Amino acid sequence: MTINPADPRPRYQQLAGLIRDQIRSGELPPGTRVPTEVELRKRYDVSRNTVRDALEVLRNEGLLISSQGRGAWVRAEPQMRYHASLTGSRTKRLEAERRLDTFGQQIRAQGKVPKQVSTVEVAPAPVEIARLLNLTEGDQVVVRRRVQFADDEPLQLGDSYYPLDLVQGSKIMDSADVLEGTDQILEDLGHTPTRYHDQITWRMPTAEESTKLRLAPATPVGRLLRTSYDQHDQPIEAYEVVLPSDRHVLVYDVDA
Amino acid sequence: MTINPADPRPRYQQLAGLIRDQIRSGELPPGTRVPTEVELRKRYDVSRNTVRDALEVLRNEGLLISSQGRGAWVRAEPQMRYHASLTGSRTKRLEAERRLDTFGQQIRAQGKVPKQVSTVEVAPAPVEIARLLNLTEGDQVVVRRRVQFADDEPLQLGDSYYPLDLVQGSKIMDSADVLEGTDQILEDLGHTPTRYHDQITWRMPTAEESTKLRLAPATPVGRLLRTSYDQHDQPIEAYEVVLPSDRHVLVYDVDA
DNA sequence: AGGTATTTGTTCGTATGTATC
DNA sequence: AGATACATACGAACAAATACC
């Protein structure tokens, strides 16, 4: 594999393509060191700047991470698997069917130490949330915001919204960690979650998210917006999680 | 506002910051032409390459669009959103994921004209696909690749992989559009899809995806990898869709 | 602890190509 | 056709961070 001057694509794009293929094929597995700029320069007979342009393309695709004085590496695969749902007959309910809220258990199951920093406030509902919870824009909601860590690495940002009159005075309004899980508390209040409605989108992070989650450049985030309904089919919670692409996979099992 | 050599940040980052602020403040509204590289070079007294590095940063953030011979502009706001899966009322059925294959119906339902360009080939299975289909790496699979459009706007890239001995000689190997849907054909072959296993990730697009999907810079893509299982719980298809963030929302309804 | 080599990051200069006006 | 503007590509030098002895 070499750079072909007759190829209509620019050299740096060709080179980016060659390296990308090596990553895809497994020839350069996640975590591997990429040859240095000088080595690539020799191997493909282009200038160092052209090598740099190629690597820049791959950095922007999120395939590589580089750091000054050390080198460049193929970015590692996501570690955290979210079994967001597990339904149905054949698989009955495995332990995977858990509220995302019970974050600690999922992290411990993966051999890591969970930590979270929570705040609770009462605020007017944002439009989108109000609509999901059948409220009028500006109605008060209780917001629990959490930054969640595994082994002191930030993993995700999770905000839960509850209609104020539903949870007023309950433990949910306590910013301390709720060990039994918020679902249990909702159930104690007479609202058992029976179904979820999930909307998944993805985008580039805001500067704030970037900081809080310590994101590498070119790391997009996923957004899972889950609405929970109780036994009367009333919406009782809207849960928004922001998930860095390099740390998560969402998994759904669905019956046809 | 000028570049300050004493500032610890590199010049191109400073310049990117200055221009970014002008965009944020509305001084450079969406759609406005950005000064040419040569003008910026004079105004801020840096080299043209440094100006280019700054503009590159902003292009990667999605704030600018440039085109050769014409100039650079502040990017205008995005367009339409497409629900990759539509949900109606609440039902037990997980209608979240009707087959994405029945692409045409969904598009027509939104008053748009569907179109798709398909190719079919037989190729060795990539590692990840082989694993999902219970094959050995390198085993042959049939690959149906589609670029799907709505009103001549590209919406998504969808590749289906089938074990070769399962579909050999069937209509699936015909690159013509399969009007009844590939699920129907699989059923005719004695394999009824009964459950799906979905994995969702997101990342930055490759240059090729960017071109095929006509993506604006800094538009991340979602990737849905769906494995279908038949009545004997044998994997019969792996389906990979690449979905631009500005055109899709994934929706799942899940029973607790 | 200290110094040197290595490696990526920044910045300039320069030339040429290609698309657009 | 000519001018303008962005794109590609090379060379060069130095800075900054890291690794190694």
Image (cartoon, coloured by chain):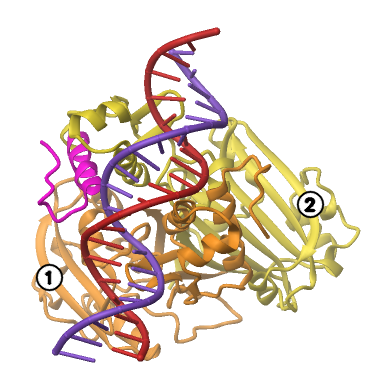
Chain colours: A orange, B yellow, C purple, D red
Residue A199 at x, y percent in the picture: 40, 56
- Mark 1 or 2, closer to the camera: 2
Q: Which residue has dot 2 on it? A: B120
> Is residue B6 magenta-colored?
yes
Q: Share a chain, discs 1 and 2?
A: no
Q: Which residues are magenta?
A: B1-23
- Whether residue A247 is visible here, answered yes or no, is no
Residue B104, by quadrant, is: top right
Q: Magenta includes B57?
A: no
SS category of the residue bearing label 1 = strand
- Residue D16, given in percent of the width and then of the height, sits at 22, 65
Amino acid at the residue labelled 1: Thr
Mark 1 burial class by Cα count in 10 Å: few <14, some 14-19, many 20+: some
Q: Report x, y in % for residue A55.
A: 46, 58
Q: Chain of mark 2?
A: B
In this orientation, which residue lies closer to the viewer: B219 or C8? Answer: C8
**Residue labelled with disc 1:** A119
* Residue at x 50% of width, y 70% of height: A35
Residue A173 in the image, given as x and y percentages of width and height: 11, 72
Q: CA distance from mark 1 to mark 2?
A: 53 Å
Please state which amino acid type lies under the numbered disc 2: Val
User: Going 56% across and 41% down the picture, which residue do you hit?
Assistant: B211
